Amino acid sequence: MPSPKSPEQDRDPLAERAIEQLIFSSRWLMAPIYLGLIGALIILIVTFFRELSHAVPGVMTMEESDIILLILTLVDISLAGNLVLIIVFSGYESFVSKIGPAEHRDRPSWMGKVDFSGLKSKLIASIVAISAIHLLKIFMDLSKYSQQDLMWYTIIHLTFVVSGVGFALSDWIDSKSKD
């Protein structure tokens, strides 16, 4: 009498390999999204220089608070650009493929070393910084905002801060549980 087949013997290795290959190859579906984010970075560059070009003609007559608001706007755009770059580099290297010029002398030291947890930390830190700058810009021009608007901007910012602390705490607990 033949021995009963185990479930592993019933599996079709060819079908299994084909499915696994399809799943593994599906990571390339993210590549167009990263290319789109590079397009978003170009939009940020255009926006940065548009803001700068609008301000330059009147810079000699600008009030100090207007200059500070301009600088905060430019820093805000810069941080958003950094955020996009972090996502493009880390996301592509983590989920799609290693970036070819791995030994290039200008390669940022963090590339290839940022795992999902590190990406999440960098992402939330950038969002908190962008939110803080936006809130600072609002506080520099309080007369334009209602009390309710100020309350909501502050609540949203604090939500980002608390989320960041929560992510950091969960990563810390996770690292302690692996020790």
Image (cartoon, rainbow, N blue to C red):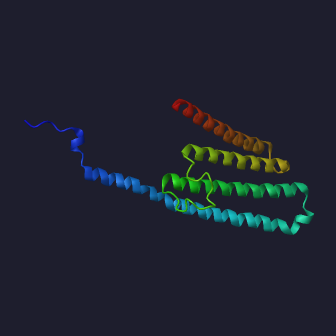
| Residue nearest the viewer, comparing 97 with 150 | 97
Give the image location of residue 46, x and y in percent: 70, 67
Give the image location of residue 50, x and y in percent: 75, 67
Total numbered labels: 0
Question: What residue is shown at x 77% (from left), y 64% (from top)?
Answer: 51
Q: Is residue 141 visible in the rendered structure shown here?
A: no
Residue 78 relative to residue 93: left or right: right
Indicate the quadrant where residue 89 lies.
Answer: bottom right
Residue ranking furthest to the left: 1
Question: What residue is shown at x 51% (from left), y 51% (from top)?
Answer: 94
Q: Is residue 100 visible in the rendered structure shown here?
A: yes
Give the image location of residue 136, x and y in percent: 79, 48
| Residue nearest the viewer, comparing 139 with 101 | 101
Question: What residue is shown at x 60% (from left), y 65% (from top)?
Answer: 39
- Compared with 84, 5 (above or below) is above
Indicate the quadrant where residue 8 lies.
Answer: top left
Residue 6 relative to residue 34: left or right: left
Give the image location of residue 114, x and y in percent: 57, 48
Question: What residue is shown at x 56% (from left), y 34% (from top)?
Answer: 175
- Compared with 137, 169 (above or below) is above
Residue 58 relative to residue 128: left or right: right
| Residue nearest the viewer, comparing 92 with 74 | 92
- Compared with 179, 128 (above or below) is below
State which quarter of the image contains the N terminus. top left
Indicate the quadrant where residue 27 lies.
Answer: bottom left
